[in-house]
Each structure stands twice: as C-alpha cells, then as structure tokens.
Amino acid sequence: MSLSNGSITDSSGAISFGNENLSTTGTIDGGAITGTSITGSGATHTLGTIEISGNTIRSTDSSRININDTFRATVFESETGLMTIDEISGFPRVRSLRGDNFLVFSAIPVYSGSIIFEGATADAFETTISPTDPTADRTITIPDNSGTIITTGSTDAVVEGMMAPDSIGQNELKTLSTLQILNSSGTVLKTVHGAGA
C-alpha cells in the first residue's frame, strides 16, 4: 500500500476498511459505487439530474423524467389527485375524483372491448357500452341537444314533444288502419292513417 500525491493505492487493486465507517465532508469521485444500501444525510439527494426529496422525485434540468422500461405502480394519480388509473376492481379503470366527470379532448379507440361506467354509486352494478362486431365502418352521432338516450328497452319514453308535426306517416306505423272520407260521388277527400288494432 502506498500514499502518493494525495492518493492511497494498493498493489492488489482493492483497499478494505473492514467493518469500519468511512466519513468525509468532501466529495467521493470515482467509478461505480457498490453496496447493499446507500444512505445519505439531509432531506434532499441528487443522482445526476434526478433529485429525491422526501417522497418527491424530480428532474433538476427538465420538467419531465423519461423511463425507458416498464414502470408499474398500484395506482397512478394525477398531480392534483383528481384522476387515478388503477386495477383495483380487477380490470383497468380511469377514475375521476371530481363528481365522476371526465373530460376527453380526443377520440378513445377501444378495440375488442367495452367502456364501463360505474355511476354515482360505487357498487356491484355498472353500465357497459359494448359494440357488436361491425361488418362495415359505422358512425353513431350524438345530436347537439340535451336529453335522454332511448333504447329498445325503453318503455313509454317517447312523448309528443319529441315528434315534429306530421313526422309520423303510414310508413312509420307497424300495423296500419286507414280511414277515408269520401264525398257523395265516392271521391276520397281525406285519408287518415292510424295504428291498427
């Protein structure tokens, strides 16, 4: 072992301090540091440009941290905690913590799957929107007005105010009864169509 120009070297290439502690108020420079654990004093620690302060990790030279491998977590939460992404219910879900409202600015492609809505109460019942396997490109347009979507399972859902004048004719009736008003010569003056018995 030799001490020269402020450096300690050993002919074997390794210097062991046994179970003793090594303390310095300066900086340790070198290659890889290997150990079972690295503990630093103080509240903030920096590795390169990554700073760890308590439970917060941030970049010191950017507003983004890039992770080049798979990153897993039990729950992903937005900065203010208004949105979470998790698998707590046994399937992937995106949950809003602000009145169950979720604003989407772009299309969400869902392939071979469904969109599930929990509703106002987190319980065992959900509403599922699931497409039938299409045989061509299909477009379903939601109109520019407020109201309730009516399905084939709806009963007594269509009211008079939803129909424009003269919007229902004989072609829209499943069964048809026709009343004709004739003049004295047998000419049809008026034809009235109604739902048949």
Image (cartoon, rainbow, N blue to C red):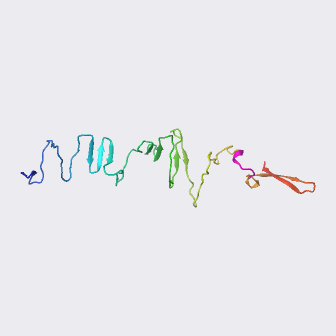
Q: Give the number of marks.
A: 0
Q: In this view of the protein, which residue sits in the foreground, 91 or 107?
A: 107
Pinpoint residue 190: horizontal percent, then vertical percent: 84, 53
The residue drawn where x is 52% and y is 50% is 114
Q: Is residue 162 visible?
A: yes
Q: In this view of the protein, which residue sits in the foreground, 14 or 55?
A: 55
Whether the magenta-drawn stretch holds residue 80 is answered as: no
Does 158 sit left or right of 27 as displayed? Answer: right
Image position of 157 with respect to 140: above or below: above
Q: Quadrant of residue 141?
A: bottom right
Pinpoint residue 164: horizontal percent, then vertical percent: 72, 50
Does 174 sit left or right of 80 as displayed? Answer: right
| Numbered range of the magenta stretch | 160-166
Does 90 sit left or right of 71 as displayed? Answer: right
The residue drawn where x is 32% and y is 41% is 55
Q: Residue furthest front?
A: 61
Q: Quadrant of residue 12?
A: bottom left
Does 55 sit left or right of 36 as displayed? Answer: right
The residue drawn where x is 33% and y is 51% is 62
Pinpoint residue 144: horizontal percent, then vertical percent: 61, 50
The residue drawn where x is 17% and y is 45% is 26
Q: Residue furthest right?
A: 184
Q: Quadrant of residue 54?
A: top left
Q: In this view of the protein, which residue sits in the foreground, 56 or 185?
A: 56
Pinpoint residue 64: horizontal percent, then vertical percent: 36, 51
Q: Is residue 91 visible?
A: no
